[in-house]
Image (cartoon, grey):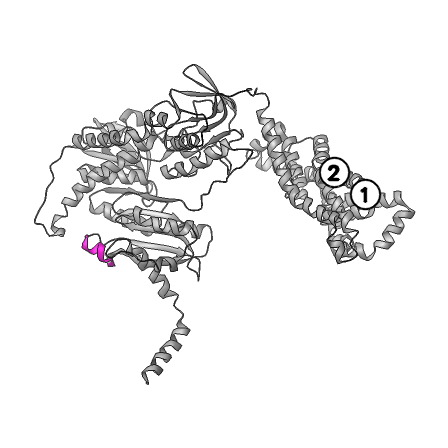
Amino acid sequence: MRKSQMITVAAITLLITAYFAFDLGNYLSLDYFKSQRAEIEAYYSASPVTTAALFFIIYVVVTGLSLPGAAIMTLIAGAIFGLSVGTLIVSFASTLGATIAFLASRYLFRDAIQRQFGDKLKTINEGIEKDGAFYLFTLRLVPAFPFFVINLLMGLTPIRTVTYFLVSQIGMLAGTIVYVNAGTQIANIDSLSGILSPGLLLSFVLLGVFPLIAKKAVSTIKAKKILKGYPKPATFDCNLIVIGGGSAGLVTSYIAAVVKAKVTLIEKHKMGGDCLNTGCVPSKALIRSASFIAQQRRAEALGMKAASVDFDFADIMARVQRVIRTIEPHDSVERYRALGVDVIEGEAKIRSPYTVEVNGQILTTRNIVIATGARPLVPPLPGLEEVGYLTSDNIWALREQPERLLVLGGGPIGCELAQSFARLGSRVVQVEMGDRLMGREDPDVSQVVMSRFKEEGIDLRTEHRAKGFCIEDGEKMLICEYRGETVRIPFDQLLVALGRVANTSGFGLEALGVTVNRTVAVNELLQTNFPNIFAAGDVAGPYQFTHTAAHQAWYAAVNSLFSGFKSFKVDYRVIPWATFTDPEVARVGLNESEANEKEIAYEVSTYGIDDLDRAITDEAAHGFIKVLTVPGKDRILGVTIVGDHAGELIAEYVTAMKHGLGLNKILGTIHIYPTMAEANKYVAGNWKRAHAPQRLLVWVERFHRWRRGA
């Protein structure tokens, strides 16, 4: 820091210290003003110019040093000078003070901050250079943002000083008028009846609604700015165009048709999306067949001497396709056309916020919903293309069973398919770079699944980081690193199951300027940065579940069709999911790992399903239910279930959390005996016993002793 900068810092520090040391803030309070009101008004009557000049200088100093008191001074300005003069004084004084604070921040800190963090601030700097005036205007218009923070932070950016001054002057004007007007009314309070005066009530109403009005104004200005340059058609072919015929796109289209909107659905490949064709449906069909094979191996446990299954792998994969074909009509072009949706099979290209091209035809639309889903993530590992690989998209084309299957990834998809192929007879090696499978779940959950996998012969290789692939002596090899050592794992077929990546390219988002990170960026209404373009499902995140995509679809449909009249924020409070391994794992809300990470206090209640009568009769006595609750209360924070039918059992807790029902309500609900669902009641009972009123029970025991005459 240069000498001049050190002197400036010392001077500012001295002034701020004096402000607090001599309690100067007391002179900027409403109480002090009211006590000195008569004298101040007399002085103003005698010397109006001097009073205004002194007030102006004090206001500039207070805002320039970022001292508390500017809001009170704005009210006082209205009380002393009235609305017109008060607004004039405060408007220029606040802008001048803000600019001084801005320049001080720039002079003292900008160069050092930019040198230290320039690479991280590059995007911010580019945004400020391009749209800095608009960003600043937005912040100034909404008083919820502390103005002194804006002054200091903007000084670190490349925005021009002249721009900063002019935008601040304009942006703060509306808020200044509201506050000064409130001050004119506050000055007239002499009695209780003054508090209820229409003028004062109006001022408080303005103070309350101004942030809402400002927010709406900002949204309107922002929308007009981003849509500027795109001619809006006088009439539209559609109310809504939906791009993508997966879960999100189908439900969006259906809802639009139900409310009699003109909706066009464009799908370039297969209706039903990943869930029907390559995801949920085929995987669950395969899991069911593999589960039947696993069950016959446990014949002795069910009282039988032996059982066997004769099967052909190709027949099982053919069954998977048969299941898909059976469900296909639910998502077919014919069905949705019958529902009133105009379905077009082709590749969509967004040409403007109002136009979409498909099959050489340009369609105009008021709104667009992007529902293009996701695809398997394929890492850029050396040698991957050389050895060849399968993903959840193309594994269903297999008709010859892999003798040695290498599964790369320990998430839900990798776990479900690894266990299924192992049960079908493949020798499966599952490689995971973390220290356990299913890393999003609690360690005790992972341990149960991993133990079962090992029992079934799956070769688990945790803490193995894939480095590349090669072919050695005609044999395919994975080269990975394990605790500092190089390990080679041979295989015949490779399944890459490392998650999924959103489909955000190839249909016009880049050219149009729709903001894309790893997914299409959307707000709480599912709007993109273009107010009439929405996104839902896997392409928008944050969850990649079919049921979440359908949940988002309702909001995308309603918010796009009725924007300007009524909008709804997406509700992500209660999102359940399940991994269909054996045992199944289902969860809703927080688990222990997340609660600890977020520093949320909780209590744990558990119930071992090995004690459940129905589980014992079914030879399914394994797993547990774990419920997190607010300490001392029965309000549910989250539930994890490990065991048979976990995906079904979790539904009771989803309902409870959605509607605010606690464990006491679950305990008081009659559950059929003998069912797996009784486990939900028993874990609630465990919570109840742990919170029994022990002191009261001592007196109850004495009461019963007295009744016995003992």
Q: CA distance from mark 2 to mark 1?
A: 11 Å
Quick check: 325 above or below 629? above
Q: Is residue 613 magenta?
A: yes
First of labels 2, 1 by sequence position: 1
Residue 218 magenta: no
Please state the total of marks drawn on the protein image.
Answer: 2
In the picture, the quarter occupied by the N terminus is top right
- Residue 388: numbered disc: none
Secondary structure type for disc 2: helix
Q: Which residue is mark 2?
A: 95
Q: In which image quadrant can residue 392 be found?
A: top left
Asked whether residue 561 appears in the rendered view, the answer is yes
Seen at 69% across and 44% down, the residue is 206
Residue type highlighted by circle 1: Phe
Residue type, mark 2 in image = Thr
Q: Is residue 387 above or below residue 49?
A: above
- The residue where tag 1 is placed is 56
Measured from the top left, where is residue 686 in percent x and y?
Answer: 34, 62
Q: Residue furthest left?
A: 305
Task: Tell me what residue is drawn at x 64 percent, y 39 percent.
Answer: 213
Seen as rendered, the residue at the extreme bottom is 709
Residue 140 location, x and y as percent? 67, 38
Q: Which residues are magenta?
A: 611-619
